Amino acid sequence: MTVSLVLVFLLAGALFTGNQEVEASESFGLIADLMMLEDQSLYGFDETVERFREEIDAAGWGILNYHDMQEVKAGHAYDVMNVKVFDLCSAEYSYNILRLDDERIVSPMMPCRISIYEKSDGNTYIARMNSPLVARFFGGEINETMQIAAAETEEVVEKLITGERIPGSSAFEFFGGLGYTRFADSALDNSFGFYLGSKVNLTRTIGLSAEYQRYSPSTHSLNGLVFTGSFDLVQTDNDNPVSLSALLGSGYYFGSVDNYDFDSGFGAKIGAEINVEIQDQLDFVGNVNYRNLDLDADNGESYDLSGFEFKTGLTYTF
């Protein structure tokens, strides 16, 4: 409910400040950016349409109808560039909404629509309603169903689009850099170290990574093989794209203290990460996370190796 109210006030502000601080065209731009999604296709118009049909069919969705707006307007002596609007339907998801009396009110928004069109720059674009945002206004079954449906159609669109790269959006990444960690146990010195790893992005917002990290002050060392899941909270698409992600992971740790080996064991971590594009295929990455870890050593002592980690480095995308 809070999210919906915030969005309502944002939209209202954009609409009613047209005569004060911003021009009407700027208000329209703000609302369009919030309510609609647009991405440039990797292919030409005809190939985008063909591939889109194939991917939608493979995803288990149906195309109820499509509207060739260029052809329609030509019949009325108007000339426009290629525009095709597709009506998409999933029998399961549409049933979830249409079977309920109160939810049926959103039927004017059905079926889902995706538009493929050309612009004067010679490129082909794909546009659709920002369903995840709109769905939050309704809540309940409508929100749940629209979120799932939007995720599936976005996977189809993802296979066709290009344009500005969202940091962290490639299929595979390699990363590395320097870190600094603190230890809760006062007997252990805080330390600088390094890390190396790779990441596979399952969707535009969800990724899995594996990394090796090592911290080695003079009297002890800590090594970790850490596996982390990431979820993008914010993504921007501008001259210097940025993504902000939440992190949750688990690691297998080992090392030594005063020439005694730690008994290897598992720990957990939670944190946040920011990616900023430096140039094509290269990002700056920085993150902070909290590590929860206790290990026993061969000297019979138990050590609290929990603490914050601060890391910075580079990510190369393939």
Image (cartoon, rainbow, N blue to C red):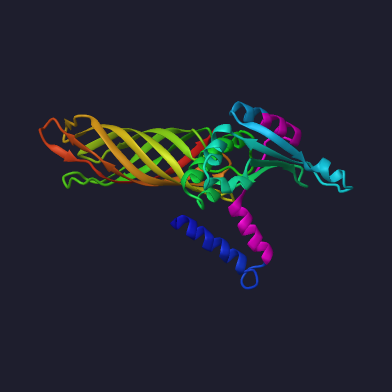
Observer-nearest of 92 and 197: 92
Residue 81, compared with residue 199, is above or below; it is below
Q: Residue at x 17, y 39 (%)?
A: 303
Count how many numbered circles sit on residues in the image. 0
Classify residue 254 by image quadrant. Answer: top left
Q: Is residue 70 left or right of residue 167?
A: right
Observer-nearest of 177 and 50: 50
User: Hey, which residue is sitting farthest right in the picture?
Assistant: 77
Q: Which residues are magenta?
A: 24-53
Q: Is residue 52 left or right of residue 100?
A: right
Observer-nearest of 163 and 61: 61
Q: Main secondary structure of the magenta part?
A: helix
Residue 145 visible in this rendered orientation of the protein: yes
Q: Residue 201: give x, y in percent of width and height.
A: 49, 34
Q: Residue 194: give x, y in percent of width and height.
A: 36, 39
Q: Residue 14: give x, y in percent of width and height.
A: 59, 64
Q: Residue at x 46, y 46 (%)?
A: 140
Q: Residue at x 51, y 53 (%)?
A: 137
Q: Residue 2: give x, y in percent of width and height.
A: 44, 57
User: Hey, which residue is sitting farthest left in the picture?
Assistant: 300
Residue 168 visible in this rendered orientation of the protein: no
Residue 50, compared with residue 80, is above or below; it is above
Q: Residue at x 86, y 44 (%)?
A: 74
Observer-nearest of 85 and 52: 85
Does the magenta segment cover residue 82?
no
Does the magenta segment cover residue 49?
yes
User: Hey, which residue is sitting farthest front in the picture?
Assistant: 101
Q: Is residue 291 left or right of residue 121?
A: left
User: Hey, which residue is sitting farthest bottom in the picture?
Assistant: 20
Residue 29, compared with residue 91, is above or below; it is below
